[in-house]
Structure formats: C-alpha cells, structure tokens
C-alpha cells in the first residue's frame, strides 16, 4: 500500500546539470547567474552570446572553404602545362583504367574525401531524425499533461458551478415556497430560513475556491455563469477529444492557462517538426546527388549541388545557434522549475503561493489550503440535511402542500452532495501533481535529449558540408575537359569494326615500335607465285587438329593466297624454293 501511494518525483537529469553549469557571459563579457529569467534583458544577452558561437564557427568554415578555393584556383594555374605533359606520360604508362598516374590519384583522393564527407552527413541525418522524434515525443507528453491538467481544472470549475447553481435554484424556488407555506408556524419557518442561510453560506465558501482561472476561455462558458459567483470556468474537454485551437494572441494570458499553453505548443511543435524534416531531406538529397555528380562527372549537377550545399551549410550553423540557446535556457528552467513557477507573475497572479506550493510539491506534511473551506461546506451540507429531516417528520402532517417543495430541495441536496465528494477528490494534490511531473519529464527528459541530438546533427552536418565544399574544386579539376572528351570519342570512332582486344595490341605496339610478325621464322618465306601477299603464318594447331587462326584479330589476318592444282604447281615449281608438290599440298589444300 505504501508503494501505491508514493508521490511521483522529479530530479534533473545529468545533461540538464551539465548544461546548467556552463558559464554565462553577457555582451560586456561579464559572468552572469544561470537563473532562468526569460523576461530579463541580461539573461537574453547571455543567450545571444551563446548563440553567436555558431556564427563564429560559420565564419571559420567559410575561411577554410575560401582557402581551398584559392589553393585550387591560383596555385595550380601555372602548373597546367607541366601537368598536361605529366598526365600524358602517366597515361602512356597506365594499364587502361586511368588510375595509375597523378590524375588518377587525384580522382581517387577526391572521391574518397567526398565519400567520407557524405558518410558523415548520412550519420548526421540519422542522428537528426532520432533527435527530431525524441523532441516531438517530449512535446507530445508535455501537451498531453497540460491538457489533462486543464481537464482537471475545468472539472473542478464545472462541479463548483453546478453546485452553486443548484443551491441558488433551491433558494429561489422550493425554499421560498416553503417559507410562504410555513408563515403561520414559527418553528417550521425558522428551520426553512436556516436552510436558506446555510445554502447561501455554502455558496460563498465554494465561490472562494480558485485555481487560477483564465479569462481566455470565458467566452465558451457564458451560459454557465452564475450570478453572484465570480467563476470563469475553463474548457471542460477531455484531452483525447480536445480540438487544437490556434490562440488569438501570442502573449501569455494572465493568469496562466494550461489549455492555452497546450494549444500554443502543439501549433509551434507542428511547424518545428516539419521544418526539421524538410532540412533533413534537403541534406540527404544534396549528399546523394553530389555522389551521383562525381560518379557521372556531370558538371551541371555538381554546380547545382554546390549551391544547395552552401545553403545547407548556412542552415546547419544557424540551427545550431538556435539549438544551443534553447538547450541552455531549457537546462536553466529544468534545474529548478518550482522556483520559476512560484516567482513568475503569470502563474501566481490570482492564486496564492501556498496553493501553488501545495500542488507543485504535494508533500505529505502539507495540508490542503482548501481543507478549511471544504470542512465548513461539509458541515453546512450536514446541517441542511438535518433541518430538512426535521421538516419531513414534523411539518408534512400539518402542511401536506409543502411535500413537493421539500422533495425538490432534498433532490437538489443529494446531487449537491455527490458533486461535493467529487470536488474533494479533484482538489487533492495527487492528480495535478502527477500531471505536473509528467509534463516536466516530457520537457526536461525527452525534449532535452532530442535537442541535444539535434545540436549534434547540426554540428556534424556543418562539418560534412564544409568538407564537401572543400573537395569539390579538386573534383572539378579532375574532370576531363571537352577537348579531351572529343579526342577520345574521335579516336574510338575511327574504325567501328575494330574490337577492343584489337585496339590494345595496336596501342601497345605504337609504344614499343614496329614489332616483327611472330610468324617470321626460317623456312616460312616461301611465297606462292603471282601473289603479292606476305608470307602466310604458320597455323597454330588446336587441340582438335584444326588450325588456330581464331586467336588472331581480324585486322591482323591477311587474305589467303589462291589455291593451285598439282599441274599448275608442276609448271612453276622450278623457280620455287620448295618444288615438292606434297609440301605445297600440305600448305594450301586445307
């Protein structure tokens, strides 16, 4: 039973304590206290100084990118002539893949730098999506707790309003009729007037119960306002069906209204969540298309992605400044939220500090500030029931016409007693304190964690885009020019029927000089008569006995000589080096 009645508590997390301990400087570089006072100009100066650190980091990243641009544009301009000769020598010594020379090494270096930067950017995007989800979960828990607290306060106001209206109805209706009927009987008339007096006293006691009612929602309950009671109830709508109402004013109402705060936070959170999703998608698109531009060596795509990378760099550093200021301010609030609520005029106007302290701490040693009012109201109800019971036993026999009015008063008092018991339960601190603790956990645990992850995302994405912008000039220099692309396409289109295997021996042959045919060997110089063709190469016999002419390229094959019959070879055999007909048949009859 002790575990079931334990009051939930709140303690600042480690990250809240670490961020709260950061030093604070104003515009004059003087140390300031880390007390959360958002309306103070000195406190706002400290937040501006902290957020300006991201602007300094942006300037440093711009200088780094500018130094790389100067390096690639100015330092390599005089080396273009020497670089072209070196590239030709490197291409002559390459194996056909284009990555053995300095240009190939430059392409590999730029590619790996771009891949590393894009990988870092993708990691940052993943961290950003997680942080955005955590922050959204924390704000959802905060708004749900505020709506639940608003529903509790609205239920309290509704019960008070119904009780007061019922008592006023009994005074103006049945009790007045009973006084007219009991005019001739003084004891019954005194009992009826005592019931009227106790009812009026109970109305005053219930009207003094106030929990910082707001005038923002007054227009929703004009029909339920009761004359003689200064009650402006809140909107009694459950959190599950509460509509999202856009507040008409951006200023916080005085006194504070949980319903107004929940609606304002929901609207702002929707815009914040959507903004971060669009920023994350922009970073992802830029990173992927930069890789595509490097792979395809598309200059127009690289130019477009460079412009978007500059935009993403500015947005990353700007969001980091906003997140830094928000994290510091939130840590100051979460380190001691009770002190801010008790000292804030928006919260304690219309509500005493004792009432706020009772609901914020909900200590067992503290008594309810409404305990005396509720006790007096309960006694008044008991006295009214006692007076009506006496009239029911004694007066109805003499005045039977008063039975109807007496039954109406008893029915009103029964409903009033039920409302009163519900009111006592709702005025207990456990319900509202649980909503308060849940809202703090959502804001200071999940919300703080989400903001820290978003800050890490902004920092990593800013570093990644700085590295990308530094590597893009090297990628641009490594791309082949239009003249080189034209020469390559022209050389490849000289002979459309030349195979790739034939081009490589020709290219290697041009480097090593003219090489003698591999079939020039002694005894192979016999030339058939009336033929200008070079000597026929000795056929390479394959495994199945067929000549292996298929291993030669088409361009290296010579036209076969004409075939001769044995009679023709006999007439011309005297002038040949091999007059043997059998030898000629072995060469040309296949």
Image (tube, helix red, strand yellow):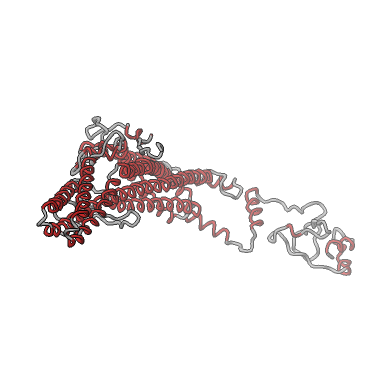
Q: Quadrant of the C terminus?
A: bottom right
In this rendering, would 91 be left or right of 154? right
Q: Does the rendering let one see residue 466?
A: no
Q: Does the rendering let one see residue 549?
A: yes
Count how many numbered circles sit on residues in the image.
0
Estimate the x, y position of residue 433 in percent, counting from the top left: 31, 42
Which of the two residues, 364 or 67, is positioned nearer the viewer here? 364
Name, please, the residue furthest toward the front. 397
Which of the two residues, 372 or 330, is positioned nearer the viewer here? 372
Name, please, the residue furthest toward the top. 31
Estimate the x, y position of residue 469 in percent, counting from the top left: 41, 46
Residue depicted at 88% across the width and 60% down the height: 583
Name, please, the residue furthest toward the left. 184
Quarter-of-image position of residue 39:
top left
Estimate the x, y position of residue 428 in percent, counting from the top left: 29, 43
Q: Quadrant of the N terminus?
A: top left
Estimate the x, y position of residue 64 in percent, counting from the top left: 38, 40
Quarter-of-image position of residue 465:
top left
Residue depicted at 23% across the width and 47% down the height: 382
Which of the two residues, 422 or 18, is positioned nearer the viewer here? 422
In this rendering, would 224 be left or right of 452? left
- Does residue 228 sit above or below 35 in this rendering? below
In this rendering, would 459 be left or right of 506? left
Which of the two residues, 8 or 426, is positioned nearer the viewer here? 426
């Amino acid at each position: 039973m002790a575990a079931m009645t334990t009051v939930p508590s709140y303690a600042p997390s480690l990250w809240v304590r670490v961020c709260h301990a950061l030093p604070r400087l104003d515009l004059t570089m003087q140390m300031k206290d880390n007390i959360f006072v958002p309306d103070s100009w000195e406190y706002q100066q400290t937040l501006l100084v902290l957020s300006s650190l991201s602007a300094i980091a942006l300037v440093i990243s711009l200088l780094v990118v500018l130094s790389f641009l100067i390096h690639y544009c100015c330092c390599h301009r005089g080396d273009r002539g020497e670089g072209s000769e070196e590239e030709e020598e490197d291409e002559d010594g390459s194996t056909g893949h284009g990555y053995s020379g300095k240009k190939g090494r430059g392409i590999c270096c730029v590619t790996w730098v771009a891949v590393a930067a894009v990988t870092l950017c993708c990691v940052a995007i993943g961290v950003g999506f997680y942080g955005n989800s955590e922050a959204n979960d924390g704000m959802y828990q905060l708004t749900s707790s505020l709506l639940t607290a608003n529903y509790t306060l609205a239920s309290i106001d509704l019960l008070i309003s119904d009780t007061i209206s019922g008592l006023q109805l009994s005074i103006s209706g049945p009790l007045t009729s009973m006084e007219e009927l009991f005019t001739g009987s003084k004891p019954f008339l005194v009992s009826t007037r005592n019931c009227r007096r106790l009812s009026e006293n109970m109305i005053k006691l219930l009207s003094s119960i106030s929990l910082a009612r707001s005038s923002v929602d007054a227009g929703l309950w004009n029909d339920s306002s009761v004359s003689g009671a200064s009650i402006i109830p809140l909107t009694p709508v459950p959190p599950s069906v509460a509509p999202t109402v856009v507040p008409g004013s951006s200023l916080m109402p005085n006194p504070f209204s949980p319903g107004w705060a929940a609606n304002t936070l929901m609207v702002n959170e929707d815009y914040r969540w959507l903004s971060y999703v669009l920023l994350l998608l922009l970073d992802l698109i830029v990173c992927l298309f930069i890789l595509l531009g490097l792979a395809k060596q598309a200059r127009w795509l690289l130019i477009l992605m460079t412009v978007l990378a500059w935009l993403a760099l500015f947005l990353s550093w700007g969001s980091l400044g906003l997140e830094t200021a928000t994290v510091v301010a939130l840590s100051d609030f979460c380190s001691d939220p009770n002190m801010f609520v008790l000292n804030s005029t928006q919260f304690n106007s219309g509500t005493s500090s004792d009432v706020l302290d009772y609901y914020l701490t909900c200590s067992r040693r503290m008594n309810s500030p409404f305990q005396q009012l509720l006790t007096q109201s309960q006694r008044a109800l008991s006295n009214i029931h006692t007076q009506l019971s006496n009239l029911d036993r004694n007066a109805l026999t003499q005045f039977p016409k008063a039975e109807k009015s007496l039954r109406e008063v008893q029915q009103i008092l029964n409903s009033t007693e039920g409302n009163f018991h519900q009111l006592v339960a709702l005025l207990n601190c456990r319900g509202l304190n649980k909503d308060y603790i849940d809202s703090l956990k959502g804001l200071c645990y999940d919300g703080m964690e989400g903001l820290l992850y978003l800050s890490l995302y902004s920092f990593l994405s800013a570093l990644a885009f700085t590295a990308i912008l530094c590597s893009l000039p090297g990628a641009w220099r490594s791309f082949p020019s239009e003249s080189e692309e034209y020469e390559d396409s022209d050389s490849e289109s000289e002979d459309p029927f030349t195979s790739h295997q034939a081009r490589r021996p020709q290219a290697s042959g041009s480097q090593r000089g003219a090489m003698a045919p591999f079939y020039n060997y002694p005894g192979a110089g016999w030339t058939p008569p009336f033929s200008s063709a070079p000597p026929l190469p000795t056929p390479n016999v394959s495994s199945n006995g067929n000549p292996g002419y298929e291993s030669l390229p088409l361009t290296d094959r010579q036209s076969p000589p004409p075939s001769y019959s044995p009679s023709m070879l006999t007439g011309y055999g005297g002038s040949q080096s091999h007059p043997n007909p059998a030898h000629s048949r072995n060469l040309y009859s296949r």
